[in-house]
Amino acid sequence: MNIRKKRFSLLIAFLSITTVIIAQQVGSNSPYSRYGYGLLMNPVPSASEAMGGISYGLRRSQQVNWVNPASYSKLDTLTFIFDLGISGHMARMSDGVSDTRDFYNGNLDYVAIQFPLFRKIGASIGLLPYSKMGYNFGDVRSVSNTQYYETYRGTGGLNQIYGGIAWEPIQNISIGANFSYLFGNFSRSSVVVPASGLVGETKYGYSLREFKYDLGMQFTYPIDKVRSVTFGAVYSPRLNARADVNPTEMLYTSDPYNTPGLTPSQVLKTDTLTNASFQLPHTFGAGVTYSTGRFLVGLDGTYQLWKDLEYPDVLDNLSQKNRFNNAFRVNAGMEYVIDPMSQNYFHRVRFRGGLSYSNSYTNFSVNDPNDPVNGAGKYTGTFKEYGVNVGLGLPFRDYMSGHVSMLNIGFGYTRQQPDRDYMIKQDMFKITIGVNINELWFFKRQFN
């Protein structure tokens, strides 16, 4: 294929995939996504995810690592990288008593490209998910011997388009920054379906638009020609966003969830909560990796200052004091390849594994089913999340340029373990496929 046509095709693919991500609603079925900004995604490249999510100290010339923008300067002056990740997952949720349900979802996780600007200066652009919201659950209730079904539903999420740049001003020391546009729409509603009569829905909708940035640095200490240690750190400042919240009460002739596009028969109340405050936290991250020609091992830590951040009380009926928790996450992982230069394909396959541990940034309202009146919403609870990942990196070579690209396959399991009775436990099994394409774009050929 003509080289220029090949480059044009890759750019068209990038723009098309970006459009798809913006248009889609990221899949989720967790009732915990009802609170705060939904479930935080913390996206990492597929190769990193198979290593437990380590990223801050990863510095590679043939892999996009947007988690630490200082890594972009490692790219040589001839290479263009295209990275795409998709996933499928099955979530099993249990109330610990009798009810267990399985949910299946698939996502386009991220799309990113990386390219050189000058010697020791690299750049990257891409689109990443920040959070996702998607839930639909309810129960039968009764008032004055009249039964009705009450359902809580929500959709939406935050995405970010980023552009980043990195520079290595001194050998083995690199600095970088990502500049992102954070955007998303949210919709939360409660629907009351009586045995007879009109269906009532109370709905809250709002949109967020805000700019954010992340600052990163990396320092590599070369032990010898093949062994090195890399330290990395990232800081993201707190965001103070403002948005209008639109609460509306409506009546329908039938359940609007089962009849999309149904027009309400009556609008009882519509209002606007103007200029509501939505804050996102200071984030601190640091990590270290030790690598040889065949082996890599790393450890990461992340801390987010969520406690006491502002958020509209009307959306979850929690207070500023008990809504958020300061969040932390620890990741550890490794990669091993028998011989990256071997003629034996199996010897060039990369074997990966990792572990992760984190807490939830938000608390949740907990109802005691043994005391449905006095125990409704009386308690708050949270959960811890445990994860284990394994994966493979399958290399394939572009014989025209000699560059090695990678097909990354990962398998993950996470457990959300609540700290209170009557909360939902979740086990999630995930399969991730990432394609990392390395192209020789900036070499001046004498012929096509």
Image (cartoon, rainbow, N blue to C red):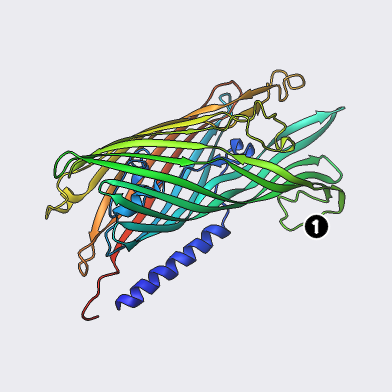
Outermost residue toward the bottom in this view: 447
- Expressed as whole percent of the image width and height from the top left, the position of residue 276 reads 72, 43
Give residue 313's quadrant in the image: top right
Q: Residue furthest front?
A: 170
Which of 318 and 279 lies nearest the eye of the viewer? 279
Quarter of the image for the N terminus: give it.
bottom left
Image quadrant assignment for residue 146: top right
Does 248 sit above or below residue 439? above
Residue located at (53% from left, 46% from top): 130
| On-image quarter of the C terminus | bottom left
Q: Is residue 3 left or right of residue 133?
A: left
Residue 164 located left or right of residue 352: right
Label 1 secondary element = loop
Can you see residue 386?
A: no
Count of residue discs = 1
Q: Is residue 43 left or right of residue 276?
A: left
- The reply to whether residue 192 is in sight is yes
Residue type, numbered disc 1: Thr
Name the residue: 33% across, 43% down: 218
The residue located at (22%, 49%) in the rendering is: 349
Quadrant of res 101: top right
- Residue at the outermost left position: 343
For label 1, the residue is 263
Mark 1 crowd level (few <14, some 14–19, many ≥20, 10 Å Cα):
few
Residue 355: where, in percent of width, then height?
A: 36, 33
- Taking depth in this image into account, of 66 and 15 the one nearest to the observer is 66
Residue 38 x/y as whole percent: 59, 41
- Judged left or right of residue 414, residue 225 is left
Up-down relation of residue 431 to residue 375 (above or below) = below
Q: Position of residue 431 (x, y in %)?
A: 40, 46
